[in-house]
Amino acid sequence: MGPMMNRTIKVADWGSLSYEIAWQKQEDFFSKIIARKKENRKLECPFPTDNHFFFVTHPPVFTTGKSGKMEHLLLNKNELTAKSISFFRTNRGGDITFHGPGQIVGYPILDLDNFFTDIHKYLRCLEEVIIKTLFDFGVNGARSDRETGVWLDLNTPFARKICAMGVRASRWVTMHGFALNVNTDLSYFDYIVPCGIQGKGVTSLAKELNEQVNEKEVKDKFIKHFAEVFEAVIIN
């Protein structure tokens, strides 16, 4: 007999936290869920596994995924230090990206056995939540067949990325997630080849709307759509 599917997701906001500490915290939650799944295999009545979602904002940092190319970082170590930007090579998928103030980063740590066991579908669902959230602000996001994340004016010379994604999964447990540019200082993207993609721009919600955006409002709308798309119950 398998464990009961648990479709509740505990949501918390970590506020502003260094990338390093947030990564460690993610790993802790991730490992606990995997340990519970291993333990469950020995039990006649397995325990349901937890699902978590964390909002966070990072001080300026560039991170790259397992397959990311170092030449996509256009600054050397001294220049990074001079500009007070950190750098981490991570265990997520995807290439280089930027995290910083004014950006909403979301880390879903879900046991997909509670939802659906399909990583491709998981990424498409995350994109769908972002697209619905942007639509609430009058911005039309789209997904690309070739790259994860959410784009505006896709398949035009003006294509620009508003949300980057990179995840890791093991035993159907996910970590890492997305970075949505809301009030982000986009000049930081000039120091990298974002997501390893040449010649495409980056944008933010504030840039598209030509005004500062209430980040709490974006988070509230995101959680509403997250619950809908994943057919989940949110616990704050």
Image (cartoon, rainbow, N blue to C red):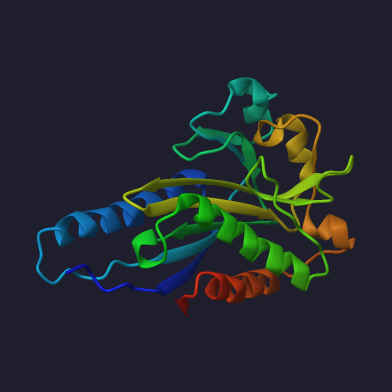
Give percent across and percent down for residue 38. Answer: 19, 54
5 over 177 or under it: above or below: below
Inspect this view and state whether residue 215 appears: no
Q: Left of 42 or right of it: where is 57?
A: right
Can residue 190 be seen from the camera position used here?
yes
The N terminus is located in which quarter?
bottom left
Identify which residue is drawn at 62% across, 65% down: 129
- How many labels were placed on the picture? 0
Above or below 137: residue 66? above
Residue 5 in percent (x, y) is at 32, 72
Q: Nearer the viewer, residue 151 or 71?
A: 151
Q: In the rendered view, would you say 10 is above or below 182? A: below
Nearer the observer, 132 or 222:
132
Residue at the spot 90% in from the left edge and 61% down from the top edge: 210
Residue 202 relative to residue 55: left or right: right
Q: Is residue 132 left or right of residue 34?
A: right
Q: Position of residue 87 (x, y in %)?
A: 56, 33
Q: What residue do we see at 27% from left, 54% from top? A: 34
Q: Residue 178, position in %: x, y?
A: 58, 52
With 4 as the anchor, is 202 left or right in this view? right
Q: 11 or 17, which is in the foreground?
A: 11
